[in-house]
Amino acid sequence: MPLNFLSDSAIHPIKRHMKKALLTAALSLSASGLAMAHPMWLLPHEFNLSGEEAEWITVDASASHTIFGVDKPLSLDKAEIIAPDGSKQRVSSYFKGHRRSVFDLQIDQPGTWKLSTQRPPVYITHYVSGKRDAEKRMFVDKLEAKKRLPDNARDVKTMLYQISTMSFITWQAPDNSVLTLKNKGLELAGPTHPSDVVAGEETEFQLFMDGKPAEDVDVELTPHGTKYRNDRQMIKIKSDKDGMVRFTPDMAGPWYLSAYLKQEINNDRADEAGHILYMTFETQLP
Amino acid sequence: MFSVLSPSVNKLIATALLASGLVLSGALQASSDQKALNIEFTLPEIASGQYQRPYVAVWIENEKGKAVKTLAVWHEDKKWLKDLRRWWRKSGRYQEEDLDGISGATRAPGTFTLNWDGTDMSGQAVSPGKYTLRLEASREHGSRTQLKQGFTLPDGQQTYRIKAGKELGPVVVQQY
């Protein structure tokens, strides 16, 4: 998957030069810049609250190829918290360690809260060159690629990646205000509320692209704890013509959803857009 | 005489009485005393250095799994009510029910009896159909146990016995 090469640091010119020589090595060594390549997640320690008073919860934020295995800390400066009444707040302060970031959040309104963060949009130009048709890429948009691509570059395609991750917390009864579509980019909504997923019961999520049901979205769903089992137990499905994905989670606990949709855009800066949406949700005991 | 009638019949009679102006306190009394189920269950003695009394909920769900009526919720700090995971998800979090009179402090091990009069959370007799009695107990430093028994309304007299789980002893359910 091309996402393995998403890297902020690759935009830095010195690193870009290093990249050419170290491409293979960097990939296997997980150089720090490649942190940006890992699927990112927000993992609240509580998803459903029942108390009578406002309650603090704590949230881990990291990016990793293992499910909820901390690896690369996320920057949370742009993270957004939306309360049930629609008010927005930033993460007031957080700890950024070597492997994960952590923030605490006071849930002081009944209803469903949304936590989310996104990466800045990334342009990657893929091309083939040389006698052996070596596949190469530059972290530039179409305009920049025109100036920089070698003369013998072939099969040139520029992708724009839009990546976000989210999770939901519910105090008392769930509600849908934070799930209201913004009609922009790849989005997910019910019919099953993310705070209402139950082991052994069919769950239905609907995916939307710019507000319209999104067909053929590649969706992967994986339960926590892959570290302690051999079978990843990942469910792979594609959304149907109504943007629906249906699945029955068998295991209670936190699950990780990733949804990927490629879309022709063909503008000045990119040929295609890759929309990636990650979500952490809890599958409850029946 | 009312106790042998199905709840819906009882409701009809109550309505008829109200309509005809023959509101007798005895008739209304009979209505609310009507028993659809008698439930006897046990909280077992558990030898444990860190024994805390379990949180317990007993309730009725309809065929679609919707909570119809809560018969008992025993708890301390509501922060941990969510640990009665199914009851919280099906009923507690919506706070639609008036739990005064059925909620209370956690109980020490022993045997307890509850009655269900065949009404829903608004006090109306439920319609005939399939229902499930559910018992859930969750204990700090302990386990969570869920027991259930399906039954049909109306039905003849029935006795159901539910096998014990870790946090709940055997249950005897008498249907009238």
Image (cartoon, coloured by chain):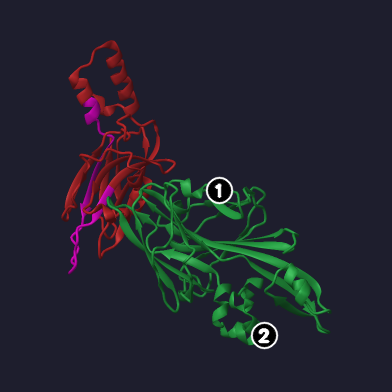
Chain colours: A green, B red
Residue hosting label 1: A181
Number of marks in the rendered image? 2
Closer to the camera, A97 or B42?
A97
Query: Where is A243 relative to A250, above or below?
Result: above
Q: Amino acid at mark 2?
A: His
**Residue A279 shows in this picture:** no
Residue located at (24% from left, 30% from top): B34
Q: Amino acid at mark 1?
A: Leu
| Residue lying farthest to the top in this orientation | B20
Residue located at (27% from left, 28% from top): B4
**Callout 1 and callout 2 share a chain:** yes
- Tell me where residue A159 sits by quadrant: bottom right
For the residues marked 1 and 2, what is the alpha-carbon distance in whole angstroms?
42 Å
Q: Chain of mark 1?
A: A
Residue hosting label 2: A17
**Residue B142 shows in this picture:** yes
Q: Looking at the picture, how far across and down is residue B100, in whole percent?
A: 22, 39
Secondary structure found at label 2: helix
Give, as a single range, the part of the protein colored magenta.
Answer: B30-57
